[in-house]
DNA sequence: CGCCGGTGAGTAGCATGCTACATGCTATGG
DNA sequence: CCATAGCATGTAGCATGCTACTCACCGGCG
């Protein structure tokens, strides 16, 4: 089972600042998040290396990094297994995001200037553009950018990096299911509330809106994963 | 007819035996934390591999993992540089520890039973044993165990893992400096306050004691690093 | 004297070779 | 027919080979 070929990493352009290990890490991470590499499945380093068009070394190094992030687990002489994300895992992830992102949103609001507000508004518009027709993949990419913008604005780079890692545990479903469009609209509205509070210069309201958003998202995802 | 069970040679049937990469990661991490590998210095994979008595592969893999943790940075064709921990880094680390450990301590207190209280008390006694004569290295190891015990008791494994990673950014100084013994005593007393609140079954007091402890430690370390 | 270009040693990054082990299949013996 | 030994195949883990690059050093030239 070789599966569909992943995008080759090699580019003919000679200037490569990034290493192949970096590229392999990004490629495998996104393949796992959007399900092209399936949770629960075993993959061999050699086969993935073939699919990516590189040698085994950068692929193994990438998988070791993803293992540390909790996305895969090596099984000796068997392969690397993509780990499933249980409802309990999602609960842990969102407990952490609440602890980190709510205070970070408040701090970002305290520091916010007009330039940040404009950036956030632009991000919100980009999200809205993915509602009709509903494109979950593009929407979630914008959602990630929105959150990262606010997190970086809070001034703690490590916090932003930790949240980015946590997000990778939420898998995207492939085809939109029934009612998915309405879900996206609801998520979008929660972001609107955050931006309105930010525009009003009200850090406590920003924090509250972020808390509401994360709690609702947690409910949604935990339920979709079968509940606790 | 199976007879009496023999001791299984394999731990879990399918789990991971420790690899050389794992051991190299632990060895290098602790060498960096206690200063045997010096911050700011460049080290080559080949030389480290010689010192550890293994080939370059597990050493490179270990350094890649430590790079992801923010402890080293590869410089192409030059080596791996041990990153310094600035006062600003420490401020970020403790901002995160406050966001995570204070609520975690409260949750641990809510869940605490007699067994946990006894474990924590034993850990506290182990810390006290390192006060006279003062042994900073052993004391800090116990301190780490104390915090990890509480974090795990809070029921969020990822939270505990994140805090463990953050702690590695605090370097131990080698020989005790003047007044170091008194510092250890003060740190110990802050842990006593946490345990007393825990014994009293008062989650809010546990959280407050943890906050005090972390804020004082932050002040101490940020000042020692030259201030913000 | 100062600048500059060559050059050789050392390096990360990547590819590949090698070994022990896990597992499925098959042939063999009951 | 069924159980099982052993063989073929595939794998992670580790070692090693190879290449392009960095940089310190040195000698010659302005």
Image (cartoon, coloured by chain):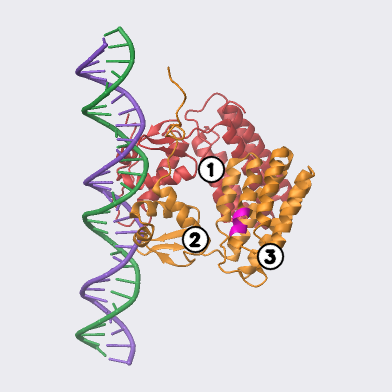
Chain colours: A red, B orange, C purple, D green
**Is label 1 in a helix, a strand or a loop?**
helix
> Which picture quadrant has residue B91?
bottom right
Sort mark 2 into few (<14), some (14-19) or many (20+) by Cα contacts within 10 Å: many
SS at badge 3: helix
Return the mark for residue B48.
none
Q: Which residues are magenta?
A: B138-142
The answer to if B139 sits in the magenta stretch is yes
**Residue in the image at 56% along x and 48% along y:** A162
Give the letter of the chain under mark 3. B
Q: Nearer the viewer, mark 2 or mark 1?
A: 2
Q: Secondary structure at mark 2?
A: helix
- A159, B66: nearer the viewer: B66
Q: Give the CA separation, mark 2 to mark 1.
A: 38 Å
Residue wearing tag 1:
A142
**Does the magenta segment cover residue A145?**
no
Disc 2 to disc 3, C-alpha distance: 23 Å
Is B49 on the left-hand or right-hand side of B191? left
Would residue B213 be visible to someone looking at this image?
yes
Residue B112 visible here: no
Q: Nearer the viewer, mark 2 or mark 3?
A: 3
Q: Which residue bears the numbered disc 2? A: B32
Mark 1 closeness class: few <14, some 14–19, many ≥20 residues within 10 Å: many
Q: Quadrant of residue A16?
A: bottom left
- Residue ID for mark 3: B183
The residue under the point 61% across, 38% down is A92
Q: Residue furthest front?
A: B4
Question: Residue at coordinates 45% horizontally, 30% vertically from top-left?
Answer: A40
Split into 4 quadrants, where in the image is the N terminus of chain B?
A: top left
């Amino acid at each position: 089972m070789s599966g569909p070929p992943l995008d080759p990493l090699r580019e003919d352009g000679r200037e490569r600042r990034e290493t192949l290990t970096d590229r392999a890490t990004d490629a495998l991470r996104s393949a796992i998040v959007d399900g092209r590499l399936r949770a629960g499945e075993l993959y061999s380093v050699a086969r993935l290396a073939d699919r990516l068009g590189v040698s085994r070394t950068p692929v193994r190094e990438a998988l070791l990094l993803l293992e540390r992030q909790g996305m895969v687990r090596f099984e000796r002489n068997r392969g690397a297994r993509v780990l499933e994300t249980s409802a309990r895992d999602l609960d842990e992830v969102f407990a952490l995001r609440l602890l980190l992102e709510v205070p970070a949103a408040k701090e970002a609001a305290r520091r916010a200037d007009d330039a940040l507000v404009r950036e956030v508004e632009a991000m919100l518009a980009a999200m809205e553009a993915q509602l009709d027709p509903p494109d979950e993949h593009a929407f979630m990419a914008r959602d990630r950018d929105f959150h990262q913008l606010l997190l970086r604005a809070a001034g703690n780079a490590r916090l932003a990096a930790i949240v980015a890692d946590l997000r990778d545990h939420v898998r995207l479903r492939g085809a939109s299911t029934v009612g998915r469009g309405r879900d996206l609209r609801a998520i979008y509205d929660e972001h609107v509330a955050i931006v309105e509070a930010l525009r009003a210069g009200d850090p406590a309201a920003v924090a509250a809106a972020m808390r509401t958003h994360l709690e609702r998202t947690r409910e949604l995802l935990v339920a979709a994963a079968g509940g606790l």
